[in-house]
Image (cartoon, rainbow, N blue to C red):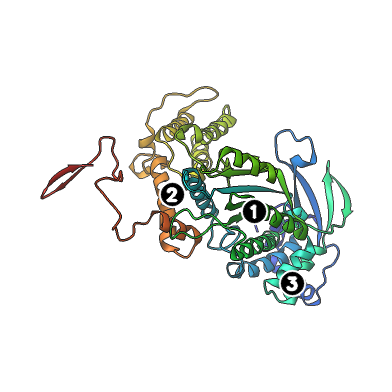
Amino acid sequence: MHPDKAPGPDGFNPAFYQHFWELCGNDIFEAATEWLERGYFPSSLNETNICLIPKCDNPVSMKDMRPISLCNVLYKMVSKLLANRLKECLDKCVSEEQSAFVEGRSILDNALIAIEVIHALKRRTRGRKGELALKIDISKAYDKVDWGFMCGMLERLGFANKWIHWMMLCVSSVNYSVLVNFEKIGPVYPGRGLRQGDPLSPYLFILVTEGLTALIKKSVSRGDLHGVKICRGAPMVSHLLFADYCFLFCRANLAETNHMMQILTTYEEASGQEINLTKSEVFFSRNLSIAAQEDLSRIMGVRHVLGTGNYLGLPSMIGRKKRDIFAYVKDRVWKRINSWRGRALSKAGKEVMIKSVLQAIPSYVMSVYLLPESTIKEIERMMNSFWWGGGTNNKGIRWLAWDRMAYPKALGGMGFKDLHTFNLAMIAKQGWNIMTKPHTLVAKLFKARWIVGNGSSIKAMSEPWLRGKEGAWISSPQGSWKV
């Protein structure tokens, strides 16, 4: 744990225990061993303060606040011990559609799959069978988990009774006090929910979502639901999960739509989760009539959209106006630069800010998309102006171009990133992951869609696979051809 993590009700942060570990380490080990053997925690151990963090600039209701649990560090040691043991076996008991908190899986896997499936639905203009993508919003996902359902899921997944007892002990022995104006209000004894701040909570939550996965897979195996296949040989994708971010796919007909909504209702009643249909969205393939799209969206009670907006912080659909779509990346960089205007930052301070903050802002979207060169140039121009500027609204004289600033310091530069080269490297990393991890869902999907087979159906002279506005010349001993 980081030494400066916020302390719990006892007031001791991790730095205290790390500094005095030689004095108190053995006592803590003996106490934790006794607590786990007896299956009992002292009431003061699991006391938790709830700190309300605003989600927006001007919060007006409790929905605009995020409750963060401040647990005692002594309890977090025990919880962290169990969490470290639990995460070693998650890969074996969590389905491949869930990519959150599982070692070896990445948030970008689900983002790439979702983008590819949405792109396939957008291009599907023929055929009688329409398909849909349903992005659902789960309201207060952690706070409404039913403990009985969670215990049943742990039993169903094959965990030992003693292990289940330990995890339920960590969850059910808690009592809360809410911090309001530096004063405690409480205690409150909950009957459900997981704490955001407990090291064990993320892993327990994804085990709870396996209930939804089981319901969907059972319906698919019986033929009641059909996922989306983007091409021949590609695996069928029926749903994607990243913690509480959920994407569902099925055929766009009345029977499958009603069955999907029944699955969600069953999952709600069993797990305690609540689907917020007002914030959910549905997107249909283009081979479905407008009237049918409106009817199905009305039956589901979900807003019909022409694109699915953002998924996991990335735009899930890209049109021709890429510069407008990725303008938000440039705006975020500009907003951060403006927040530093007028501060007396030294050159060393500006260097740290550029390398650790500004250059990190576009790195996530660069891992999936190749940004337009104009957008990259504008971002580099803003960072260069910030480096040479002298204060508020003073750009200063740029004594060196950004491509020279991107040279290593040993060669006369500052070691800043060439963003276009960095963009290519991040995309190449995804290609490397697909090559080295062929068992993952994203690798199976992309290989089926994009990898060339034996070449029997490839016509190089008639397909636009070579770059260039005027085409490209191919030379051979027999002559030259223009593609």
Q: Position of residue 180 (x, y in %)?
A: 84, 43
What residue did someone put label 3 on?
A: 164
Identity of the residue furthest to the right in this view = 186
**Which residue is located at x 80 percent, y 74 percent?**
39
C-alpha gap between disc 1 and disc 2 = 42 Å
Q: Quadrant of the C terminus?
A: top left
**35 or 190: nearer the viewer:** 190
Q: Quadrant of the N terminus?
A: bottom right
Identity of the residue furthest to the front in this view = 128
Q: Based on the displayed image, in which of its 4 quarters is residue 453 positioned? A: bottom left
Q: Position of residue 223 (x, y in %)?
A: 59, 62
Left or right of 264? Residue 362 is: left
What residue did someone put label 2 on?
A: 426
| Residue 4 in sight in this render | no
What residue did someone put label 1 on?
A: 255
Q: Nearer the viewer, mark 3 or mark 1?
A: 1
